[in-house]
Image (tube, rainbow, N blue to C red):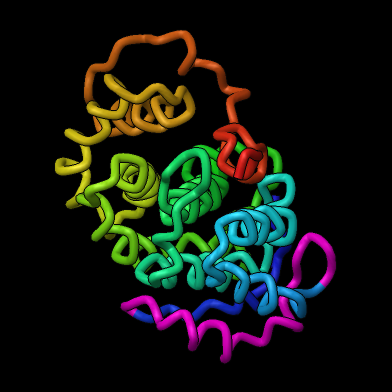
Amino acid sequence: MTHNSSKAGAPHETDLPPYQVVLAETDWGSLQTALGNGEDLPEVLSRLLEPDSKGQVTALSELGELVGHQNTIYEATAPVAMYVAGILIHPAAMTLRPYRNVPIRATLLNWLASTVYDASDEIVGRTEQYFPGYLARDTVVTAFRDLRPMLYRAIAPFMQDSHEDVREAALLAAIILAEHPALAEHCDHLTVHARHILDTSSDDPSRRVAWKALKTWGHDVPDLEPIQDESWDWGPHSDGRGDLEPPF
């Protein structure tokens, strides 16, 4: 579901603008969120740069409620996603999650993967059946989908990250983003990684994303029951992956 408007607050630059620019130049108060306007978003986004993983994860959880509530793309979703993608290179993204010893960067990437999945071909195609015009050019979801090449370039460097959790999260996001026609050239390269996730990942939602992508790209894949459930969901909106759950 989305809210029709042309005020998506997200420019169509070729490259992702610096996160400082996104934070400073976005008119947050004019953008709609699940709880009203986005005037509180700068404070929440700034907390993602604190060297405290509990505070960072709490901020991501708040963002899920503000710009991803009920898997909806809001006006503020696009600039928030641009900001989150922009801080992947920030030193604060390397803060380790206590008890898990996983960089917060993996959680940021999982948040991005979940958010772009809410605007994926599968989800919007299903919604279009019930809400004709859902993908008209003046809708928020269409403006957000136009950002996919930009977001892909931001996460691409982490597909070869030395940390397994970061690497898988980046690949998962890339597989979803690669639905965009401008990214079709990457599908052959991503096929190898999608098969690896399908064959080795212990996370069923991640395996389902890989399975769906391989099917869409014309590859033979086994019919696996855990991946066939169409009611499946994950990410910070559903807490399916548990990335936003304690222990922090």
Q: Determine whether, in the image, residue 92 is placed left or right of residue 165.
A: right
Asked where in the image residue 60 lies, by quadrant, the reply is bottom right
**Residue 30: percent from the left, percent from the top?**
74, 82
The residue nearer to you, when weighing 131 against 11, is: 11
In this view of the protein, which residue sits in the foreground, 93 or 134? Answer: 93
Q: Quadrant of residue 74?
A: bottom right
Q: Which residues are magenta?
A: 14-36
Residue at 52 percent across and 67 percent down: it is 51
Magenta-span inclusion, residue 101: no
Residue at 38% over, 81% down: 13
Q: Can residue 33 be seen?
A: yes
The x and y percentages for residue 97 are 50, 49
Q: Is residue 230 left or right of residue 44?
A: left
231 sits left or right of 192 in the view: right
For this rendering, which residue is in front, 36 or 246?
246
Q: Quadrant of the C terminus?
A: top right
Taking the view exactly as shown, the residue that stands out farthest to the right is 36
Q: Which residue sits at x=73%, y=51%?
A: 69
Residue 116 position, x and y percent, is 50, 52
x, y percent for residue 213 = 34, 33
Identify which residue is drawn at 35% across, 25% down. 201
**Vertical side of 189 occupied by 191: above or below:** above
Magenta stretch encompasses residue 29 = yes
| On screen, residue 179 above or below 44 | above
Can you name the residue that lies furthest to the bottom here? 25
